[in-house]
Amino acid sequence: MLGIKRLGLLAALVLVGIAPAAAAQAAVQPSQQDTQYLQAVHQVNLFEITAGDLAQQKGQSQGVKDLGARFKTDHTQLDQTVQQTASQLGVELPNEPTADQQSVIDQLNNASGEEFDRLWVTSELAGHVQAIQATQTEISQGSEQSVVQLAQTALPTLQAHYDALVQLAEQLGIPVPQATASGTPSPGGTTPAPGGTTETPAPGGTTESPAPGGTFETPAPTQS
């Protein structure tokens, strides 16, 4: 009987130890904001890796080829962190770009020469505007520290990409969005998208403009 009582006490102690651990694990679940950002930035990375390859293969301008190689390298490295963070948080990531992103990839595959360069730079400008906005939103509204830190690390890279794209666009005579003093596209500016224009909303709206060829699901910051 004494042995049975000791076993019962041991089982109770084990359960007491498990309960807080289970509760702590449940509390780690990321918010919808964090989850959507991880999924969206992963799809951006998938697009950028493919678009970077195409730029190196089909770009007419050496500047397009060089930026394509740079973007592929940077987004491959970024995606390693995204996948690691998502795995730790139990977030399932898409295994392919969005339908809109794939549509742009198809357009790039069908373009050549100067047309390819213009389409590539234009779609990259539009995408990086939205990637920057979505990343800023995660930094200000994210609740999971590991995802916020990822966004803080990604932001300077995305901004550097945008700045390089602006310089290249000016060299190639491609329109660029209005920018603030910090270099980030102004909320009220417009960024040309392939085949038309893509408006970037003022704060308080939603980011309906495409990320590189697609759409960021992450909401824009709301005003109080």
Image (cartoon, rainbow, N blue to C red):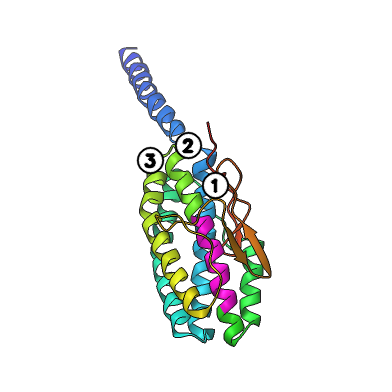
Query: Which residue is depicted at the point 63% across and 70% down?
Result: 104
**Secondary structure type for disc 2:** loop
**Residue ID at (56%, 47%):** 218
**Percent x, y of residue 163:** 42, 65
What SS does tag 3 mark? helix
Pick whichever of labels 3 and 2 is earlier in the sequence: 2
Look at label 2 and name its amino acid. Answer: Gln
Q: Which residue is mark 1?
A: 36
What residue is disc 3 on? 145
Q: Pick whichever of labels 1 and 2 is earlier in the sequence.
A: 2
Q: Are marks 1 and 2 in contact (CB under 8 Å)?
A: no
Say which quarter of the image contains residue 139.
Answer: top left
Q: Considering depth in this image, is 60 or 8 the residue closer to the camera?
A: 60
Q: Quadrant of the N terminus?
A: top left
- Residue type at mark 1 is Gln
- Residue 119 part of the magenta-drawn span: yes
- Which picture quadrant has residue 203? top right
Gap in Å between the C-alphas at discs 3 and 1? 15 Å
The correct choice, above or below, for 132 with respect to 25 in the image is below
The answer to if 71 sits in the magenta stretch is: no
> Closest to the observer: 92 or 159?
159
Secondary structure that dominates the magenta span: helix
Q: Which residue is mark 2?
A: 29
Residue type pointed to by label 3? Gln
Residue 57 in the image: x percent, y percent?
Answer: 51, 85
Residue visible at 44% across and 81% down? 63
Q: Which residues are magenta?
A: 118-131
